[in-house]
Amino acid sequence: MDRKNSERTYREMYGQPASFQAINDSLVDIYKVLDQVFAEKYDELIFTGCGTSLYLAQASAHAFGSCTGIPAKGMCCSELYYFPETYVGKGRKVLVLPITRKSYTTEVRMAIDKVRSFDGVKTLAITCDPDSAQYNDFMILSPETAEDSVIMTRSFTSMVYLAVILAFYAGGQKEKIEAMKDYGKQSETFLKATDEMAKRIVREHPERNLYITLGQGINYGIANECMNKMKEMSLSNSEAYYTLEYRHGPMSLVDDKTMIILLGNEETVEGDEKLLEEMKSYGALILAVGAKATERYGAADYVLNLDYGYDSLQNGAMIGFIGQMMGYYLAEQKGLDADTPRHLSQAIVIKD
């Protein structure tokens, strides 16, 4: 990997398979914490974060709601801080799960301090930062995820992977965790395929100037993160939507300068394919990513097949590679260095 442009970020992207394997190697310790947390019953789960961690919260809430049957939502920390009474209290038992790369992000600390003042609230941090233990009731640390880059890559995907593991365990589906024992090796293969695909698309279609990522279920939060990676890394005009919501106004921008990335979900294939056919008729270039993508998405100009026998939750950590790689090659095309993104830092600290 001889890279001068965005070298640090690119190297960390290739560290993602090792992060997945590190989580698999830590399952015994992870299960012990979960057994403590879910010894109690909760009326609701609230996942919260800022920026990329908000999109993690959205994806994690879907995974937990699907697997446990406990109502779950994902929201930004500022909403939870400003309007806590809307979400906690009133005699309900709520587990709040802050998701963080750095524990000192101001809005995270404000939100958690606020909700912990309410009766019936417990907090479980899903984090890359051991200091999170200081202000939460419980903590699960994502191993092998330390990043020097401002841009979150392996910290995002490793915490998606971790959240899915947690959801399966809490929902009594350990067999799905056991089926993912080779995830590290499989993701290494898929990461390389995604790298080559993104490089090819950017070089073959330099005229594109609007990038849309679509997804449903767990893939909606991941679509938002793909949007975010292309903005942060390459200053590109990128957006994300629930797949079928794209018809309700935003598609008016589609033309022959638009690229659409579909993050496919096995529950939504028929509706997705109809939408892609319509967008292609308006001039959009289409990439479909997912299980059996070649078979399912005939309207796509490019496909990335995630054919490891996994469901959409299990595929969640890998399907988001495409946003990172598109961001990287768009930055390269523009002569930008994603290691030093404009106006950004690893954590936002608001000073008094």
Image (cartoon, rainbow, N blue to C red):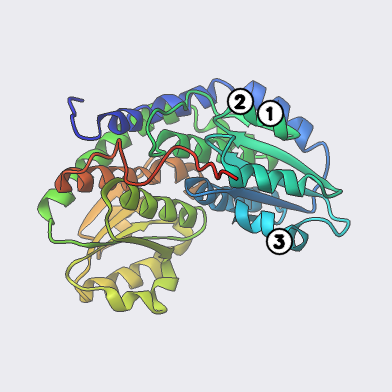
Q: Is residue 139 left or right of residue 153?
A: right
Image quadrant where residue 205 sits: bottom left
Say the numbered circle drawn on residue 91.
none
In this rendering, the answer to whether 132 lies above or below 285 is above
Q: Earlier in the sequence, mark 1 or mark 3?
A: 3
Q: Residue at x 83, y 40 (%)?
A: 40
In front of the other: label 3 or label 2? 3
Q: CA distance from mark 2 to mark 1?
A: 6 Å
Q: Are marks 2 and 1 in contact (CB under 8 Å)?
A: yes
Q: Are marks 1 and 3 in contact (CB under 8 Å)?
A: no
Give how far across and how far down residue 72 sits, in percent: 67, 54
In front of the other: label 1 or label 3? 3
Give how far across and how far down residue 186 sits, in percent: 37, 31
Give how far across and how far down residue 34 sits, in percent: 71, 33
Dot 1 alpha-carbon crowd within 10 angstroms: few under 14, some 14 to 19, many 20 or more: some
Dot 2 alpha-carbon crowd within 10 angstroms: few under 14, some 14 to 19, many 20 or more: some
Q: Which type of secondary structure does the marked residue at label 1 adopt?
A: helix
Q: Residue at x 34, y 33 (%)?
A: 13
Question: In this orientation, which residue lies closer to the viewer: 208 or 184?
Answer: 208
The residue identified by callout 1 is: 133
The residue identified by callout 3 is: 83
Q: What's under tag 2, amino acid-wise?
A: Pro
Q: Residue at x 63, y 27 (%)?
A: 131
Q: What's under tag 1, amino acid-wise?
A: Ala
Q: Residue at x 55, y 29 (%)?
A: 142
The residue identified by callout 2 is: 130
Q: Quadrant of the N terminus?
A: top left
In this rendering, the answer to whether 262 lies above or below 96 is below
Q: Which type of secondary structure does the marked residue at label 2 adopt?
A: helix
- Whether residue 182 is visible to the viewer of this picture, yes or no, is no
Q: Earlier in the sequence, mark 3 or mark 2?
A: 3
Give how far across and how far down residue 230 sits, in percent: 31, 51
